[in-house]
Amino acid sequence: MTHRNIYMTDELQAIYDQTVEFVANEVVPHGDQWEEDGKVPREVLRQMGALGMFSLRVPDELGGLGMGMLASATLAEALGSSTYAGFDVTVLVHTDMAGPHLVHSGSPQQHERWLPGMMSGETILSIGVTEPDAGSDVAGIRTSAVKDGDGWRINGTKTFITNAVYGDLTIVAAKTDPGNRYGITMFLVPAGTEGFSVAKKLDKHGWRCSDTAELVLDDVWVHDDQVLGTVHRGFYETMRNFQNERMVLIGMGTGAAQAAIDQTLAYTQERKAFEGHLYDLGAIRQRMAMNQAKLDAVRSSMYHAAWLGDQGIDNVKEMSGVKAFGAEAINQIMYDCVQFHGGMGYMRETPVERMYRDARILPIGGGATEVMLEEVAKRSMVGGS
């Protein structure tokens, strides 16, 4: 479809259209099998890399397309049309949650070594911040790294790490300044590094075709050239990317919610009931209209917050707000879509059943709703930004 969106340029529309076509042809026919397998085939990711989908946010001078947050929002929404959120998040963790750390903080040598593979889909990235006792509270991580010769020795555990079971490179956050709550450093840890292992492939409620790991770092030694960014400044480098992470989660949710609305409208207009069709019932018709209105508001707010970021304007309040409101709204939309499918909405053969499960993580991942609302609240006080 053509967006009624003041931020949508011809170039962004082309990205949207190309991505929607790709997922319709290469993802939707195979998604059910990927859900069973618990992984997205590497060949599909390489195809996306060849089409330039992994290069949107990489600067021109580093071989990418040099685009901004609006491009990521567009890609995320288009991916959401697949209705397989596990596929969507596999891509977006690579491109927009882990990838920006390498782009923004990497040295020329690190860029030369890792960026070509990241853009081609040969090297799939994950971001290892979350721990059993530290989720939204990044500063609360316990994984530690201690200087050891011309390198560092890392010990700790990470959990809920997407792409880390089958991926190639994990960006690991570790405490390097014990006396400073925010004294965190990021490290590049390739799969297969001695002492770095997948303790468990996690079994999830939704996002079934994405791989999610519990990781153990047992006396993992990395060289100084594997430090990503500035020592002790990893917390702030992580915070820098949070708005992007929040945005793409809402973007993929928006694409999925639109697909769910479209499918539900089609179903209710065909499903016979009470000597007519379900859509003839005003309660259903008006609820779906309200759902579309809410989703349009979420979409517009997301693109506006992305535009602010591209202008260099602080968008923490706006992006936190759309993450909080959008995640809750998308879940309500999915609830209604299951409800209006009736018994079929509860069956695994119906896409809305899967999308309903997949959406539940949105108010949790990338910063829980309650944390997002605190971000908005403290910026809404008199004198706040």
Image (cartoon, rainbow, N blue to C red):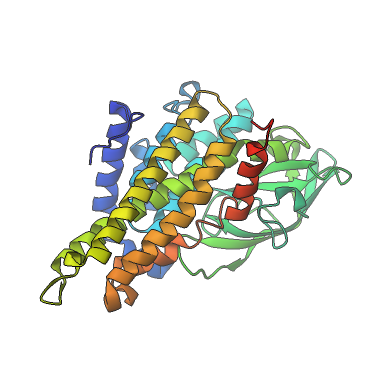
Q: Quadrant of the N terminus?
A: top left
Q: Nearer the viewer, residue 306 or 103?
A: 306
Residue 4, percent from left and from top: 28, 35
Q: Residue 215, how many percent across, how many down?
A: 65, 60
Percent coordinates x, y for residue 17 in the rendering: 26, 39
358 lies left or right of 348: right
Whether residue 79 appears in this view of the structure is no
Residue 85 higher or lower than 73, as above or below: below
Q: Which residue is drawn at 53% across and 50% down?
A: 324
Quadrant of the frame with the C terminus:
top right
**Residue for point 28% across, 75% down:** 342
> Which of 251/215 is in front?
251
Relative depth, front residue between 60 and 253: 253
- Kindly identify the residue that appears in the image at 49 percent across and 50 percent down: 325
Residue 119 falls in which quadrant of the image? top left
Nearest the viewer among 335 and 231 is 335
39 relative position to 377: left or right: left
Residue in the picture at 32% in, 65% down:
337
Instruction: Locate residue 263, reporting x and y percent.
Output: 24, 60
User: Given the current orientation, which residue lies at the most extreme left position?
Assistant: 275
**Image: 78 above or below 277:** above
Residue that extends furthest to the top in the rendered view of this protein: 61
Q: How many labels does the image show?
A: 0
In the rendered image, the residue lying farthest to the right is: 179
- Observer able to see residue 59: yes
